[in-house]
């Protein structure tokens, strides 16, 4: 089940206002709902606006999956890095393949009520 | 107070459609207790590694269930869950309790029933070791996570699929002579390369199988063993347990397991040894790439150089750094919650000189047990008692 914070995170991407979290004490980066900083331990991580363009770090094609994605294989999952320094995992859209270093655009897809998925489309 | 391993045993790994978690664990425990020359009634505490009983078998509270069916329902018991590192963590916690003088004799092990559950449900259950929202919800499976790590490693260091395949070939060859091993047939590099893709660059034969099995070890304080005129042959010389972020995306480097580096450092320091002192190791090769990351995190190889180890024959039984002489998770099998204890069982056999793939003059052995994609790592250093 998707937690409320996650639905909120995905909806923000959908309306074009994606966020990440930044530590007010040491500038470390992360994702909601982190509050305690993984670098310095201070509970000072707060929302900051995130760009929508990222660069592919690694990718793989999933051919055997969990029941939720049954019948949707094969699909590609990738991790992309934003200029803010955070990395996010999502499914590739728009192309069959992608390479490390390629630019991708962040998006979301609605699958069902409160069920969203992070996507990346080649820019 | 030092802790010795008085007895250690595993069931056969593979399919056990006519058995159950409580029966398999009891079988392993009975064998381990028999080998220890102690009696069931001597067991003061039971620590059980288990990952998915509550998810697939409607069974939680495994510690109490196992203590009950081993025949010591009144003993203190607990379930230890650190995903695939559950039993490694259980062994370490029991060791620390004995060191602290809390128990003299503890039965520690793990059990997992996976086969009867069905592949999609098992894939789903295994995914529980990852970050649900950030990984599972985008359809990233467990092999997928390791596929991302392998892809990153190969791009970064120029490693090849042939080098990864050599790990499966080596481990499957070792499995042939190990009677408990799930797979007992050799395979070729070509067969590994041609196997069905699962999460490229990883194919079906880069992955460990789904396994039913149980392992158990009897831990005893050396003082207690002496008082009882027992002479266990192996002691736990040192251990380490460390962590990392649960989601792969939150790590600075994908193809690096820093939790295992930290756990290894702690274990080496506690044992007063260096990586070069290790004669034989059992490492967590849930996927071929995981064995590469393991030998690098343990300090056996520099980063980027671990991929060539199996292909060059260096990690073979007669190589200069034998790794996974049992067949590893890839051949022996991976009953998730039992694996950390199964590795200890195999190293005990090596240090007692009775392993089917015996390494000459093995005196110091190591186990490396990893949970999830590396958010938990437990390392043990074992030594033969002179
Ligand atoms: Zn901070």
Image: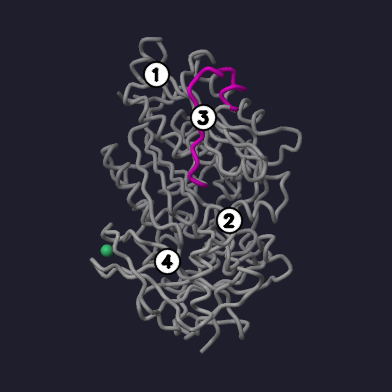
Q: Could you tell me which chain the residue with mark 4 belongs to? A: A
Residue B62 against residue A32 in the figure, above or below? above
Closer mark to the observer between disc 4 and disc 3: 4
Name the residue located 41 percent from the left edge and 83 percent from the top edge. Answer: A51
The residue to which callout 1 is attached is: B104
Q: How far apart are marks 3 and 2 (CA)?
A: 37 Å
Q: How far apart are marks 1 and 4 (CA)?
A: 46 Å
The residue to which callout 4 is attached is: A32
Q: Position of residue B88 (x, y in %)?
A: 46, 39
Q: Which of marks 1 and 3 is nearer the N terminus?
A: 1
Q: Mark 1 vs mark 4: same chain?
A: no
Residue A12 relative to residue A29: left or right: right
Q: Distance between the residues labelled 1 and 3?
A: 26 Å
Q: Position of residue B291 (x, y in %)?
A: 48, 54
**Mark 4 vs 2: CB contact within 8 A:** no
The residue to which callout 3 is attached is: B354
């Amino acid at each position: 089940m998707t937690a409320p914070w996650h639905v909120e995170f995905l909806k923000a991407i959908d309306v074009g206002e994606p966020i990440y979290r930044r530590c007010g004490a040491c500038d470390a980066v992360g994702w909601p709902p982190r509050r305690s900083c993984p670098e310095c331990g201070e509970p000072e991580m707060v929302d900051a606006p995130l760009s929508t363009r990222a660069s592919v770090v690694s990718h793989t094609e999933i051919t055997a999956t969990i029941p939720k994605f049954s019948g949707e294989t094969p699909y590609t999952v990738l991790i992309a890095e934003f200029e803010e320094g955070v990395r996010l995992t999502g499914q590739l859209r728009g192309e069959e393949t992608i390479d490390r270093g390629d630019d991708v655009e962040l998006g979301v897809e609605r699958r069902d009520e409160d069920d969203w998925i992070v996507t990346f489309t080649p820019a | 107070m030092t802790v010795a391993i008085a007895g250690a045993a595993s069931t056969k790994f593979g399919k056990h459609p006519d058995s159950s978690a409580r029966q398999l664990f009891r079988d392993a425990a009975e064998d381990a207790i028999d080998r220890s020359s102690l009696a069931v009634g001597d067991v003061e505490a039971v620590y059980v590694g288990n990952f998915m009983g509550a998810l697939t078998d409607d069974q939680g509270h495994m510690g109490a269930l196992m203590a009950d069916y081993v025949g010591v329902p009144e003993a203190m018991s607990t379930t230890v869950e650190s995903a695939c590192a559950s039993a490694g963590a259980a062994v370490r916690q029991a060791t620390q309790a004995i060191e602290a003088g809390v128990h003299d004799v503890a039965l520690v092990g793990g059990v997992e029933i996976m086969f009867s559950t069905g592949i999609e449900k098992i894939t789903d259950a295994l995914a529980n070791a990852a970050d649900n929202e950030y990984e599972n919800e985008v359809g990233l499976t467990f092999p997928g996570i390791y596929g991302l790590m392998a892809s990153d490693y190969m791009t970064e260091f120029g490693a090849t699929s042939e080098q990864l395949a050599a790990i499966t070939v080596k481990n499957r060859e070792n499995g042939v002579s190990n009677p408990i091993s799930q797979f007992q047939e050799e395979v070729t590099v070509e067969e590994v390369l041609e196997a069905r893709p699962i999460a490229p660059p990883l194919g079906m034969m880069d992955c460990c199988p789904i396994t039913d099995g149980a392992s158990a070890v009897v831990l005893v304080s050396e003082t207690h063993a002496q008082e009882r005129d027992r002479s266990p042959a192996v002691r736990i010389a040192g251990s380490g347990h460390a962590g990392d972020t649960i989601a792969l995306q939150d790590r600075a480097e994908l193809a690096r397991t820093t939790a295992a580096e930290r756990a290894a450092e702690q274990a080496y320091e506690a044992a007063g040894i260096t990586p070069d002192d290790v004669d034989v190791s059992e490492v967590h090769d849930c996927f071929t790439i995981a064995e590469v990351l393991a030998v690098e995190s343990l300090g056996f190889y520099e980063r980027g150089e671990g991929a060539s180890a199996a292909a060059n024959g260096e990690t073979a039984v007669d190589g200069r750094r034998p790794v996974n002489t049992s067949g590893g998770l890839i051949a022996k099998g991976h009953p998730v919650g039992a694996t950390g204890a199964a590795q200890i069982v195999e190293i005990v056999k090596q240090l007692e000189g009775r392993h089917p793939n015996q390494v000459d003059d093995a005196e110091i052995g190591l186990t490396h047990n990893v949970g999830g994609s590396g958010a938990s790592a437990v390392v043990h250093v074992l030594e033969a008692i002179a």
